[in-house]
Image: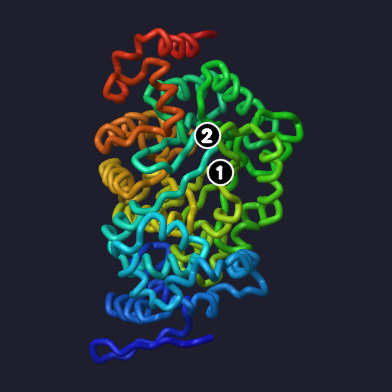
Amino acid sequence: MATYSVRLGGETHVFRDLKEVLACASPLRSGDRLAGLAADSNERCVAARYVLADLPLKVFLEDLVVPYEDDEVTRLIVDTHDAAAFAPVSHMTVGQFREWLLSYEATTEALSALAPGLTPEMAAAVSKLMRNHDLIVVGAKIQVVTAFRNTLGLPGRLASRLQPNHPTDDPMGIAGSTLDGLLYGVGDAVIGINPATDNVDACITLLSLLDRLRERFEIPTQSCVLTHITNSIQAIERGAPLDLVFQSVAGTQAANAGFGVDLAVLREGREAALSLKRGTVGDNVVYLETGQGSALSAGAHRGVDQQTVEVRAYAVCRELKPLLVNTVVGFIGPEYLYDAKQIIRAGLEDHFCGKLLGVPMGVDVCYTNHAEADQDDMDSLAVLLTTAGCNFLIAVPGADDVMLNYQSLSYHDVVSLRHLFDKPPAPEFEAWLRRMGMLDAAGRLAPAAHGAPHARRLLDYGAAP
């Protein structure tokens, strides 16, 4: 295991291994400080970035931050690395790679071809040398397109997850929140419920509710109950109308074990969903969530800084060919991302690194009420992510999730972002909104259209006993 050093300002800084270089080069966050991994001074952080900038990208194929022998995520990263795809940048250092990413040569097509040749550690490393503006500029050039009943990730589009959670899983409450979201044009990415009661029977009940609504109005979207993937497998075996299997994942084998999964069960879940053949325009059948701090909170970060171990989770995501991936960026709490500055930075990092690796990345722009953040901060992050070409954002009624007790974006926020940036929803969903009379001639959500006959049917459905 190599050591690394640099002399800076009359002082020699020594880093005992690559993990320490990566950790000390990270912008400050409370999780790394909690883990004892953060640089103890600004000077040491800058020194680590000097070291990182001069490291050849090839180093990350040889000096592994988590050993190959005892971690299946590392084995996945190494065994699936595409040397041919990596070849165009294989001669570069991390600093040179940053410059190339920001250049005209790094086109959408070139970045798409490069993705299989990059490891998570390479993506994490280059992000640590980038300002927020850099992360936005490069993220906006990357397109990751997926499809199930509609097509997501197309340029000039902004999709949204409709999250109609209810503290008791009351069907009428969920239906009301769902219909409300649909009237705001939200839900093209997925109508996804976090169940308050996480078992197979509850999962089937909610899946059936959403499927009846989707079929009644011929909505070109997909639904998901965010239950454990083993529950989804059982629901499929019992004939449930399941579109997407869901699972939270992390960047080490031990952290995934804390979620009750490994690569084998994740692949089993994907195959089970594929067997139903419910997609109409594509077969991406997996929805995954990640978040900085999850590995540390499970005591399974293996001494790796929280941003790098988060990006390792995207290797797991990439393997499963998902329709959707999102980071729940501020959900895990201030122990890991203390304030708005850290949350905003992490959201931009996660989006950039995920898309750089070929993952269809969305973000839950969110915070908990004991973090040093507020809704103005989330407005800022939502605007930045929309500028960066984020595949989808999550919206809840009134920006307040009454079941999970955290703050996210509202349905209204999605509408305003689409108008501000001229980014309509997925094309199939946009066409449905037009058929329902919920868009005006300019393609904007039209409040007056709530009186249109087809939109009236949605309202009448919600009022039915």
In the rendered structure, which amino acid carries the disc numbered 2? Answer: Gly
Q: For mark 2, what is the residue? A: 192
- Residue at 29% x, 13% y is 448
Look at the numbered disc 1 and give the secondary structure of its residue.
Answer: strand
Outermost residue on the right side: it is 237
Where is residue 97 drawn, in percent x and y? 37, 71
Q: Residue at x 40, y 8 (%)?
A: 453
Judging by the rendered image, the residue that carries numbered circle 1 is 287
Please tell me the numbered disc located at residue 373: none
The relative height of residue 107 versus residue 246 in the rendered view (above or below) is below
Q: Quadrant of the N terminus?
A: bottom right
Q: Residues within 10 Å of mark 2 (few under 14, many from 20)?
A: many
Q: Quadrant of residue 205?
A: top right
Left or right side of 415 for 464: right
Q: Is residue 369 above or below residue 444?
A: below
Dividing the picture into quadrants, the one containing residue 54 is bottom left
**Mark 1 crowd level (few <14, some 14–19, many ≥20, 10 Å Cα):** many
Q: Quick one: quadrant of the C terminus?
A: top right
* Mark 1 or 2: the one toward you: 1
* 354 sits left or right of 232 in the view: left
Between marks 1 and 2, how big is the CA–CA gap?
A: 10 Å
Q: Residue at x 26, y 42 (%)?
A: 376
Instruction: Assign a secondary structure to mark 2.
Output: strand
Figure colour scheme: rainbow
Q: Quadrant of residue 234?
A: top right
Residue 104 lies, in percent from the top left, at 29, 62
Q: Given the image, on which type of amino acid does mark 1 rest?
A: Tyr
The answer to whether the residue labelled 1 contacts the one labelled 2, judged by CB atoms less than 8 Å apart, is: yes
x%, y% of residue 355? 44, 54
